Image: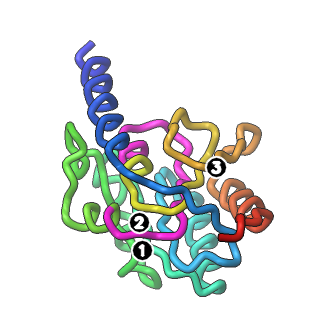
């Protein structure tokens, strides 16, 4: 019962914060992206491997990126934290303890949210306050995510209900962002 009220309060507060943000949507083609921020929930090793595969693609396209990996508790992340080597400076690991009741921002997460990027890519497919908090408050020109979540903070939703995994979602995001032709300004 308490969790129901807790979530209503948290989402009400988040909605108020998001409405105060003056944000202009800037549609971007995948081949024109210079900076990207990625959010992913890591549940198993194959999620982590799919994420690294997607990051290698971004690396080959010379896209500067940073990543937030989320788990409900720090213990789940400890194995992945030890295995990060190639991109370690670009990874931030967060859990519910880092977000807090009202989305209290910790040091690295606050910087991650504040710094502008061309595109925010949300690879999380489960509903959580942490995922909505980051998607809602991130400073990004264009936000892309899965349609499987109830989040309303993306500019482009990708429907992957028949194949819910990070590898497929990242392939679809690359596909659709490559097809986009932004309006000339």
Q: Which residue is mark 3?
A: 156
Residue 165 drawn above or below residue 35:
above
Q: CA distance from mark 3 to mark 1?
A: 32 Å
| Local SS, label 2 | helix
- Toward the viewer: 181 or 163? 181
In the figure, is residue 73 to the left or right of 28?
left
Q: Where does the image place residue 50, in percent across and percent down from the top left?
A: 61, 64
Q: Earlier in the sequence, mark 2 or mark 3?
A: 2
Residue found 44% across the figure and 50% down from its top:
135
- Crowding around mark 3 (Cα neighbors within 10 Å: few <14, some 14 to 19, many 20+) is some
Residue found 35% across the figure and 49% down from its top:
21
Q: Which residue is mark 2?
A: 80
Q: Is residue 38 magenta?
A: no
Q: In this view, which residue lies farthest toward the front?
A: 185
- Crowding around mark 2 (Cα neighbors within 10 Å: few <14, some 14 to 19, many 20+) is some
- The answer to which image quadrant residue 109 occupies is bottom left
Q: In this view, which residue lies farthest toward the top?
A: 1
Q: Where does the image place residue 133, in percent across and percent down from the top left?
A: 36, 45
In the figure, is residue 112 to the left or right of 59?
left
Q: Bounds of the magenta span?
A: 114-133
Label at residue 83:
1
């Amino acid at each position: 019962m308490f969790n129901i009220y807790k979530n209503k309060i948290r989402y009400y507060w988040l909605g108020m914060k998001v409405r105060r943000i003056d944000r202009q949507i800037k549609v971007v083609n995948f081949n024109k992206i210079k900076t990207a921020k990625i959010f992913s929930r890591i549940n198993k090793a194959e999620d982590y491997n799919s994420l690294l595969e997607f990051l290698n693609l971004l690396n080959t396209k010379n896209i500067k990126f940073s990543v937030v990996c989320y788990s409900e508790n720090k213990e789940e992340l400890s194995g992945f934290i030890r295995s990060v080597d190639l991109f370690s400076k670009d990874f931030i690991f967060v859990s519910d303890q880092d977000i807090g009741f009202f989305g209290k921002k910790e040091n690295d997460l606050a910087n991650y949210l504040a710094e502008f990027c061309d595109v925010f890519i949300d690879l999380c497919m489960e509903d959580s306050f942490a995922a909505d908090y980051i998607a809602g408050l991130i400073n990004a020109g264009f936000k892309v995510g899965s349609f499987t979540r109830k989040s309303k903070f993306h500019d482009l939703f990708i429907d992957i209900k028949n194949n819910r995994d990070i590898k497929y979602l990242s392939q679809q995001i690359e596909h659709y962002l490559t097809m986009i032709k932004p309006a000339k300004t």
